[in-house]
Image: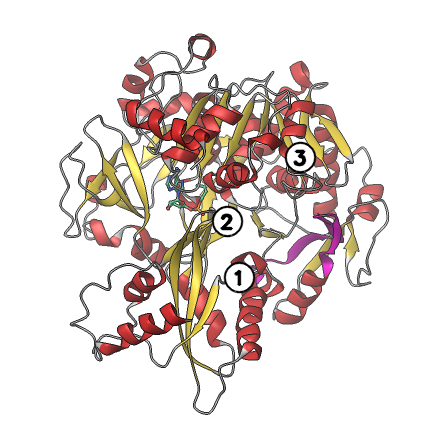
């Protein structure tokens, strides 16, 4: 152990809480504890967030909860998200930077609100010219280039919900999402840079188009002026469309508060990802309000969240929240360690970033790389966030010390794709920081912890259970796209009285385990369902298993989460092969290949383990929990319900000798 570790550990042993610095408190957007009382006026408190927006017509009802869990927020109100994120800032901040983009190759772009207005309008005109109409879902498969937020805002301008598919997803995953969203338009790009290489991205669109039985029009942006790879003649070049619509403006369409703004597909407990549908008014109000109070964003700040816009974090806290507040939001195209492990800190210094928002996985990676890559870079964060996974106190303290220079506040924000924005997080000026704990409920949010029988565990008992939310909030998903039953079964059925029309009988199940300590701080422990969290990315074990099942020689597969010091969790795949098939590298490569093909390279398994049999109950259900115990070297636990109790021990012996 190094001296460094000793000081970190001893410090954690003697200090549970860290106070926000006085200078932070003095300037914070949320510095008056009365904010909690205001939001306890339920649901009226949430009007404070809606009032941060420009509305074309005011709402007449804050919340219609007459048909739970299909809640409606700011009913009767009309607004446009692109107007709120762009147009309304032009008078005062037209010359100020909206997007600061840095390409991995060093190219930079400083896009002012005036520039953004021009580009969003031209792109909206371009989309209309190819027949995109209000309520058509546009699927966007773009990496971290300015075209991504521009296309999202152009869709919002004309009232076409977008469905952004993370660029790392494979062609098959893209095709599946195009099909599920019934999309007639797909927006992509020729390629982009990753670790110094120009990746051909259009080939994923080509393959996806061959795969899907729909026939969408493909619109292709280019990373440089001219395409760098072959682009099919069937595709429409966005650059040509923009040439035809130079200088055009498109009136923002007034959307009902309840009209969908976007879909975001996420993994669940079945093989099919769910299209979480987010509304325009409630979502935009919620992410604007939490960007202001939790992220403490001011228009004059430079704010940087190095996540990918292809996940919910990027939607809410790179694009919609920050731009709605008129601030400067930074985007970086490439890998954090290219060309050196100081890249992130060079960018932070060059752009004088004030607020930095990242994941525990990234923090653990920075920590592993060592503080020598941070030292000597002159940046000064006022505020830092973590999101996506629990953060270990050791990693928290390293972040606090080496990145925050012990003078920045840190908020650990718990939320989900479904929740739209932060639900459990401290307001940084109003609470002391407690490493490892997300902390207090956000204003107006009512979490609780239930046991498996649906009984509420007493508050502040320190006892672990299921994290639930007992009251609706404006950022919540509206439904699962095209599948109201799945919306109910995934999130509500377990802890609600589904026959009741009374909203207080409906409880949202998060799928996470949590404890609330005596001091009121919540600590989120991780998923309780068949969903894994790999480097802050959600992966369904069933999705991985169905990908592996596509491989001819595989008889059965089960996926278990192995704890990993860097990525939090990684998938181990346990496989039985068909009679007569040899267990060899070639089969293993095909299994890994199938996962890359069906989901994407980011989902690659940690290990593929050939076994003779999988542990099953008498009714034939695979017991993943036992495999998880084996992967993690834990005690096996109860095996009496197994059809053949010797199976897990055989697997364990095999894993240990491998
Ligand atoms: C799952 C949601 C929300 C944006 C990123 C992930 C885990 C999220 C925390 C946190 C502990 C966390 C949960 C949650 N999670 N934030 N601060 N502490 N766990 O979005 O892909 O929808 O995943 O991420 O398990 O359910 P997502």
> Is 183 included in the stretch rendered in magenta?
yes
Distance from label 1 to label 3 (Cα)? 25 Å
Q: Which part of the image, by quadrant, shows the N terminus?
A: top left
Residue located farthest toward the bottom when viewing the structure as drawn: 580
Q: Nearer the viewer, mark 1 or mark 3?
A: 3
Element type at marker 3?
Answer: helix
Left or right of 442, for residue 102: right
Residue 4 in the image: state x and y as whole percent: 45, 29
Tell me which segment is drawn in magenta: 177-202
Instruction: Give the residue number, with chain letter if any, for mark 2.
Output: 264
Q: Which residue is at the front of the view, 59 or 119?
A: 119
Q: Quadrant of ligand 1?
A: top left
Q: Nearer the viewer, mark 2 or mark 1?
A: 1
Residue 191 in the image: state x and y as whole percent: 74, 52
Q: Which residue is at the front of the view, 219 or 351?
A: 351
Say above or below: 78 vs 23: below
Task: Find out whether the residues at labels 2 and 1 contact each other: C-beta distance under 8 Å.
Answer: no
Element type at marker 2?
Answer: strand
Q: Earlier in the sequence, mark 3 or mark 2?
A: 2
Q: Is any part of residue 286 visible from this angle?
A: no
> What's the residue at 47%, 24% (across, down)?
401
Q: Earlier in the sequence, mark 1 or mark 3?
A: 3
Task: Find out whether the residues at labels 3 and 2 contact each other: C-beta distance under 8 Å.
Answer: no
Distance from label 3 to label 2 (Cα)? 29 Å
Instruction: Give the residue number, with chain letter if any, for mark 3.
Output: 343
Instruction: Give the residue number, with chain letter if any, for mark 1.
Output: 604
Q: Which residue is at the front of the view, 608 or 534?
A: 608
Say above or below: 239 vs 580: above
């Amino acid at each position: 152990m190094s001296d460094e570790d000793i000081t970190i550990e001893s410090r954690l042993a003697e200090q549970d809480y860290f106070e926000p610095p006085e200078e932070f408190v003095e300037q914070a957007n949320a510095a008056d504890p009365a904010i909690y009382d205001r939001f306890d006026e339920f649901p009226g408190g949430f009007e404070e967030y809606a009032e941060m927006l420009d509305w074309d017509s005011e709402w007449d009802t804050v919340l219609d909860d007459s048909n739970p869990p299909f809640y409606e927020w700011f009913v009767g109100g009309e607004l446009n998200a692109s107007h709120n994120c762009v147009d309304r800032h032009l008078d005062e901040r037209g010359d100020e930077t909206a997007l600061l983009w840095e390409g991995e190759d060093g190219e930079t772009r400083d896009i002012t609100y005036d520039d953004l207005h021009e580009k969003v309008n031209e792109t909206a005109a371009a989309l209309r010219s190819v027949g995109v109409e209000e309520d058509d879902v546009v699927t966007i498969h773009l990496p971290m280039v300015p075209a991504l937020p521009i296309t999202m805002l152009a869709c919002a301008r004309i009232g076409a919900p977008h469905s952004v598919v993370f660029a790392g997803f494979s062609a098959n995953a893209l095709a599946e999402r195009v099909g599920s969203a019934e999309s007639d338009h797909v927006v992509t790009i020729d390629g982009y840079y990753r670790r110094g290489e120009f990746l051909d991205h259009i080939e994923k669109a080509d393959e996806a188009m061959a795969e899907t039985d729909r026939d969408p029009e493909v619109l292709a942006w280019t990373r440089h002026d001219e395409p760098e790879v072959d682009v099919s003649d069937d595709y429409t070049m966005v650059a040509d469309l923009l040439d035809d619509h130079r200088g055009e403006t498109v009136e923002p369409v007034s959307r009902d508060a309840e009209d969908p703004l976007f879909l975001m597909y996420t993994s669940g407990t079945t093989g099919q990802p769910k299209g979480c549908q987010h509304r325009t008014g409630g979502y935009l109000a919620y992410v604007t309000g939490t960007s202001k109070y939790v992220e403490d964003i001011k228009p004059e700040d430079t704010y940087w969240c190095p996540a990918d816009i292809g996940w919910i974090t990027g939607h809410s806290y790179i694009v919609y929240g920050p731009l709605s507040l008129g601030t400067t939001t930074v985007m970086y195209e490439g890998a954090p360690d290219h060309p050196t492990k100081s890249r992130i800190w060079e960018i932070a210094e060059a752009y004088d970033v004030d607020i930095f928002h990242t994941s525990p996985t990234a923090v653990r990676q920075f920590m592993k790389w060592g503080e020598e890559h941070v030292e000597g870079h002159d940046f000064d964060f006022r505020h830092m966030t973590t999101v996506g996974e629990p953060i270990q106190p050791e990693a928290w303290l390293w972040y606090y010390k080496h990145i925050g220079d012990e003078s920045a506040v840190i908020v650990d924000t718990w939320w989900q794709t479904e929740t739209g924005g932060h639900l459990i997080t401290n307001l940084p000026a109003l609470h002391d920081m407690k490493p490892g704990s997300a902390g207090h409920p956000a204003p107006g949010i009512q979490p609780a912890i239930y046991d498996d029988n649906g009984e509420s565990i007493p508050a502040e008992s320190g006892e672990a259970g299921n994290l639930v939310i007992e009251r609706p909030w404006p950022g919540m998903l509206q439904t699962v796209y095209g599948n109201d039953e799945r919306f109910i079964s995934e999130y509500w059925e377990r802890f609600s009285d589904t026959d009741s029309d009374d909203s207080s009988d409906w409880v949202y199940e998060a799928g996470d385990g949590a404890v609330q300590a005596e001091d009121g701080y919540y600590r989120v422990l991780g998923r309780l369902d068949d969903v894994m969290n790999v480097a802050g990315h959600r992966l369904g074990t069933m999705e991985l298993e169905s990908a592996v099942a596509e491989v001819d020689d595989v008889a059965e597969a089960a996926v278990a989460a192995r704890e990993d010091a860097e990525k939090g969790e990684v998938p181990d795949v346990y496989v039985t092969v068909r009679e007569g098939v040899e267990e060899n590298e070639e089969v293993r490569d095909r299994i890994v290949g199938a996962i890359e093909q069906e989901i994407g390279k980011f989902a690659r398994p940690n290990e593929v383990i050939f076994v003779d049999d999988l542990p099953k109950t008498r009714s034939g259900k695979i017991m993943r929990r036992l495999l998880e115990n084996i992967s993690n070297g834990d005690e096996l636990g109860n095996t009496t319900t197994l059809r053949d109790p010797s199976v897990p021990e055989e697997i364990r012996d095999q894993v240990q000798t491998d």
